[in-house]
Image: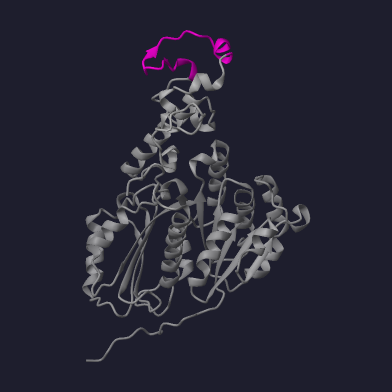
């Protein structure tokens, strides 16, 4: 029997520099610096920041100091207006790197501060304005809740602005990656690995050596402009044959997703199924993939990529699905994540009220279940019994803070906050991650 092979054989690089990976701001640079070494050779990494010290600490080939004249390499101090000015000033330098042969651009940035929220919208709007058929995807890191209401408000505004200038926006909410018993370094490494897998899946899918490949311009047409993309990815290792049912199950429950994939509401879907040559994949997988999507209720425009990729680990397979929808709000929230967020935010409000500490978002997190204010919390005597109190705010201010708070039941979870020599040495020690509401263990 004659062997059927792809018309174009797979190459390690099929157009050097045609894909740009641009990190904007400190958070974006950290991700790019972590992942670019593991990407194909045809990816050009570019790091941009207003802080020269941050740029000096990265290993990417190309670096652009934004706002060299206006800011002098000192950063924009979290001010988006300064970031915007710096982005406008340095557009010419960036355009020299993003030449006519560019086909696909990934922007990676944290939003909520100055450079990511200020410079990236300007760069996204102007960098590709005169370049046709260039697909652009922005991967944005949404700030942790404790960053404060102002920071998250800036992040929301900048996301809406960035959407106007790229084909798709993928938002990774940092709150969704926090697990209380994991080191921060491990959490961030896992998040960066997740981003790397998304980028690799898209890049490998555009390899002309696949049985079904895509062109980046097709991806841009499919996503169009201004839509938020929801991503699911599953990787199986040490296998002889892929298990599609298991892969779909892993995709639908990925812990980093604020919204689960909802095939019923998707207007457009990009589906990529890739495997190492050592994995046995038969022709029936195409029909199985179609039936699986149909059983999930998918009725969207599809773009399919499928084939062997030797850069994947041996005995491994990858399934990547990206979907977009114009039906805002139709996606179903992950109920476990939703419940976890509600519980931890309520704890944050109670802790803030009990300790007399003002948290910016404490007043608007849980509107339907108001908590007691400082004056409404009953006094507790030495036997732990409540005693009525009708003291005015002025009268309470005359009582020393320590006397006011030391026996408050809400502060038992933070025993070291008002520690004195008179306190019992038998106080129960509370693990550090349990004293901070937003680091409570999150559902898997």
- Residue 389 on the magenta span: yes
Q: Is residue 265 left or right of residue 160?
A: left
In the rendered image, residue 64, in percent from the top left (x then y), is placed at 67, 63
| In the depicted structure, whether residue 238 falls above or below residue 395 | below
Q: Is residue 6 left or right of residue 40?
A: left
Number of numbered tags placed on the structure image: 0
Name the colouring of the figure. one colour
Looking at the image, which residue sits at the far top? 390
Q: Which residues are magenta?
A: 374-398
Q: Which image quarter: residue 9? A: bottom left
| In the depicted structure, whether residue 10 falls above or below residue 72 | below
Q: Is residue 291 left or right of residue 104?
A: left
Q: From where the camera sits, is residue 106 visible?
A: no
In the rendered image, residue 131, in percent from the top left (x then y), is placed at 60, 66
Measuring 33% from the left and 45% from the top, which residue is drawn there?
334
Of 313 and 421, nearer the camera is 421
| In the depicted structure, whether residue 239 falls above or below residue 152 | below
Q: From where the camera sits, is residue 36 visible?
A: yes
């Amino acid at each position: 029997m004659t062997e059927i092979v792809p018309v174009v054989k797979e190459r390690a690089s099929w157009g050097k520099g045609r894909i740009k990976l641009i990190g904007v701001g400190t958070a974006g640079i950290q991700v790019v610096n972590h992942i670019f070494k593991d990407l194909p050779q045809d990816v050009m990494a570019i790091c941009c920041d207003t802080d020269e010290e941050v740029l000096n600490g990265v290993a990417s080939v190309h670096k652009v100091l934004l706002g060299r004249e206006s800011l002098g390499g000192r950063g924009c101090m979290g001010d988006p207006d300064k970031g915007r000015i710096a982005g406008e000033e340095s557009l010419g330098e960036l355009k020299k790197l993003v030449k006519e042969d560019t086909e696909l651009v990934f922007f990676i940035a944290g939003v909520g501060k100055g450079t990511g929220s200020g410079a990236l919208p300007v760069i996204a709007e102007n960098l590709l304005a005169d370049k046709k058929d260039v697909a652009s995807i922005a991967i944005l890191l949404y700030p942790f809740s404790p960053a404060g209401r102002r920071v998250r408000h800036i992040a929301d505004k900048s996301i809406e602005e960035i959407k106007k200038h790229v084909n798709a926006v993928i938002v990774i909410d940092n709150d969704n990656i926090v697990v209380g018993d994991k080191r921060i370094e491990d959490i961030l490494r896992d998040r960066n690995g997740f981003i790397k897998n998304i980028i690799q899946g898209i890049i490998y899918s555009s390899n002309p050596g696949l049985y079904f490949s895509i062109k980046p311009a097709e991806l841009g047409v499919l996503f169009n402009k201004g839509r938020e993309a929801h991503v699911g990815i599953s990787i199986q290792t040490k296998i002889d044959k892929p298990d599609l049912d298991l892969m779909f199950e892993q995709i639908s429950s990925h812990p980093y997703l604020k919204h689960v994939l909802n095939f019923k509401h998707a207007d457009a879907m990009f589906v990529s199924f890739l495997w190492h040559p050592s994995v046995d994949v038969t022709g029936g997988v195409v029909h199985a993939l179609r039936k699986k999507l149909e059983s999930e209720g998918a009725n969207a425009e599809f773009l399919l990529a499928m084939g062997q990729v030797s850069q994947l680990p041996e005995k491994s397979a990858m399934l990547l699905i990206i979907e977009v929808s114009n039906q805002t709000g139709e996606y179903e929230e992950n109920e476990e994540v939703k419940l976890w967020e509600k519980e931890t935010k309520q704890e944050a409000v109670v802790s803030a009220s009990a300790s007399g500490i003002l948290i910016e978002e404490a007043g608007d997190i849980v509107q339907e279940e108001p908590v007691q204010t400082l004056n409404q919390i009953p006094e507790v005597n030495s036997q732990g019994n409540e005693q009525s109190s009708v003291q005015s705010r002025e009268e309470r201010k005359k009582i020393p803070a320590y006397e006011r708070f030391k026996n408050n039941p809400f502060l038992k979870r933070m025993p070291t906050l008002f520690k004195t020599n008179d306190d019992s040495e038998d106080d129960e020690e509370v693990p550090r991650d349990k004293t901070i509401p937003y680091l409570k263990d999150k559902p898997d």
